[in-house]
Structures are given as structure tokens and as C-alpha cells.
Amino acid sequence: MKSNIAEGFQEIREQNIMKVKEAKEQGQKMVGLYCTYCPKELVLAAGAIAVGLCGTREEPIAFAEKHLPRNLCPLIKSSYGFAVSDTCPYFHFSDLIIGETTCDGKKKMFELMADLKETVVMNLPQNPLQEASLELWASELRRVKELLEERFQTELSDEKIRAAINLTNREARVMKRLYDLNKARPALISGLDMLTVSWQVGFNVDREEGIGMLEDLITRVQENAAQGGTAGAAATPRILLTGTPVGLGSEKIIALVEESGGLVVVMENCGGYKTVDILADESDQRDPLRVLAEKYMKIPCSVMSPNRGRLELIDKMIDEFQIDGVIDLTWQACHTYNIESFWVSDLVKQKGLPFLQIETDYSASDRETLRVRIEAFLEMVK
Ligand code: SF4
Ligand code: SF4
């Protein structure tokens, strides 16, 4: 039977294009973002729409490969392909792009993107343990704040930034409550439904409406569970997916796990659980830019060196979500996640669980080979 958990979420991206168009006609500004490190609180404090533009579909990659090497992460090629072919309405309507110097491929791609649209690239420090990194990031936040003020003719008062911090924290808390529903055994939401909800809700122009939709969904899932509705059986293998980000269009690993009788009960990656516990402290009365800088330096992404936080998070999630096996996804040519897989494998094996690393791209060409590997992995898990 087809699940109706994600009902109301499937079409948000398409439906909101009209709302974006109307908002733009009324003078509202829009900023396109490509990374979890992007301080969306500043964009919101400027009264602009903040939208994530990471490419998760294969179709635009051919356009990107006219300018970018083929041997590059599909997320970067898809993102650039949408932009250069002008096939993403959200990129089209963006007034400004904010990028960061995360991995090499992404930061060089932003140099090309700057020829298409005004792009500011924030200098992301990569050692999260150094005080100098915090200072650099706080100064980068100040640079972007001033740029937004100048570009959108507005003032980003501390009060406005604190209000945006509150909104962003409430969004993170409601997402965590939703993800945490799957700590139950049997799980309550399939990985594909969870991805549809979390990916689509980000396109909601009205963020309060998005929070309300998630709260309603949590109530629906709880009511459904009270009547015995679950997403699998108690014995269904519970998989944690970690590694590179996944979105609609690049969900083939989740689909294969669930077609093969397993369930992705939670994702550790960006768009999953990685940041739901990382909140800016609203009671902290210091400069909000400093408070934000501290928040962002805690994100455990593989572009950081060292990046111990990711292993700590995976360790905790394995216990809390009663995980039976871990799959680590690496998009082709993503060196940082590829290398970190060594430590993730070590940790998972120390915890006595099966581990599988998969390196792939957005194409369907290896789908059947991957199916065989995933089926064998699930057999081991069982
Ligand atoms: S995985 Fe790292 S670089 Fe990629 S979006 Fe997340 S935080 Fe940014
Ligand atoms: S998946 Fe890896 S290579 Fe791709 S954009 Fe993210 S950090 Fe860069």
C-alpha cells in the first residue's frame, strides 16, 4: 500500500514557484544558498527569501560538463548545470548567491557561477578547534551582513538577527522531533517519505507555514502509530545513512535499501540529522554574529579538519535509533567524505555492526550492481 505520510509535501517545490514570483513582483528579495554553513539567519533578518539550491538531479549535469570536468562531484555539476542552463526557477529568481569555500570543487565552481549571477563566496575556515577560525568566521558573517544591508537597502539590527535565530531554531527543533519519531521500533516513517518531507519543506517561502506543516505531520504520524501504523516490522533492518547529502532525484541508495527490505530510519548527512541539535544560544546576549559563528563552527562536515564531531554524532545516533547497519555514501570525486569513510568504518565495526561504503553518482547506470551489494549487505544485517 502506498504511504500517504508525505501527502501535502510532494508538490511544495512546484507550488512555491508562483509564490516566489509574486513575492518578487512585490519587491521581496531572494538569496540562493548551497551549503549548511551558509548563515541563513542573516538572509532572513534582511527580509529576503532563503532557498537551498544544491543540485540533486542528473538532468542538468550534461550542461555543466561543457564547463566543468566530468570527474567532479555530481552535486557540484548538478548545481552548476541548473544555473548555466537556467532550468531552476529558484536560481533564476535569486538576486544573490552566497557560497562558501568548502571543498575545492565547490569553491572553484562558484568562480564560474559568478559569471552568471552576483555571487559572494564566504571564506570558511577549516579547523573548527582554533579560536582564529571563530574570529575569521565571525568577520565573514559581518562582511555578509554589511553586503546584505547595502545590497537590499535594509538594516540588520541585532533584534532582527535574534528573531531570525529564533525562527531557525524552531525549524531545527521541529525537524528533530520529526526525525526522532523513528527512534521507535518498528520505525514510523520510511526513509523515502522522510526525505520527501525534509527536502520539500525547504522550498516553503513562508517558513512559519513550513513549521506548522511539520507539526501537523508529527501529530498525524503519532495518531497513525497509535492505531498500529508503522513503516516496517520490528525485524526490518534499520539502516543509518551517512556521508554526502541526498535530495529528491539523488535518492537511489535509499530507494534500493527500501526496495530490498530494509529501512533508512535516519540520515546523518546534511538535510538529515547533522544540524538539528546545533542551535544558536538564544539566551546569549553577546554580539549575535559571534553567537552564530560559534554555532556554524560546530557543524561536523568532512570539509573540516579535524572533524571529530561527525564520529561522535554517528556513535550517538547508532544507539538512539537502534541501528542495525550503516551505509556511508560518497559522491564520486568527493575526497573529504571518501577519506573519512576509513574512520566511520572503524567506528561502526567497533560497535559490532555491518558497514558498507558506496561510491556512486546520480546516474542509474550502476543501479542493479548496487542492488546486489545492498541485498547482500542487508542479508548480513539480518
Ligand atoms: S556536506 Fe558539508 S559542504 Fe556539503 S552542504 Fe553539507 S556542510 Fe556544506
Ligand atoms: S559532496 Fe563532497 S565534493 Fe560534493 S560538494 Fe559536498 S563536500 Fe564537495
Image (cartoon, rainbow, N blue to C red):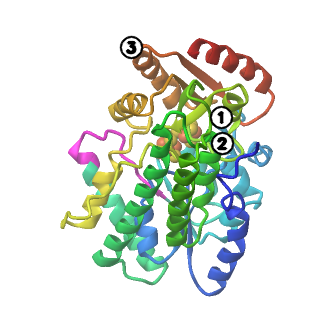
Q: Can you identify the residue that label 1 sits on?
A: 254
What is the CA distance from the residue labelled 1 to the residue labelled 2?
A: 7 Å
**Does 143 appear above or below 228?**
below
User: Quick check: 232 left or right of 310?
Assistant: right
Q: Can you identify the residue that label 3 sits on?
A: 350
Q: State the extent of the magenta-drawn residues as a range.
A: 121-133
Q: Amino acid at mark 1?
A: Ile
Q: Amino acid at mark 3?
A: Gln
Residue 143 position within the rendered picture, expressed as x and y whole percent measured from the top left: 37, 65
Query: N-terminal of the two: label 1 or label 2?
Result: 2
Q: Can you identify the residue that label 2 sits on?
A: 192
The response on whether ligand 1 sits within 8 Å of label 2 is: no
Nearest the eye: 294 or 112: 294
What is the CA distance from the residue labelled 3 to the residue labelled 2?
A: 29 Å
The quarter of the rendering in which ligand 2 is drawn is: top right
Q: Does the magenta-highlighted stretch encompass residue 279?
A: no
Q: Is residue 36 visible?
A: no
Q: Residue at x 69, y 42 (%)?
A: 68
CB atoms of marks 1 and 2 within 8 Å: yes
Query: N-terminal of the two: label 1 or label 3?
Result: 1
Q: Does the magenta-highlighted stretch encompass residue 130?
A: yes
**Does 152 appear above or below 278?**
below
What is the CA distance from the residue labelled 1 to the residue labelled 3?
A: 24 Å
Q: Residue at x 52, y 69 (%)?
A: 207
Report how many numbered discs are placed on residues in the image.
3
Q: Residue at x 35, y 50 (%)?
A: 278
Residue 173 position within the rendered picture, expressed as x and y whole percent measured from the top left: 40, 56
Q: Amino acid at mark 2?
A: Leu
Query: N-terminal of the two: label 3 or label 2?
Result: 2
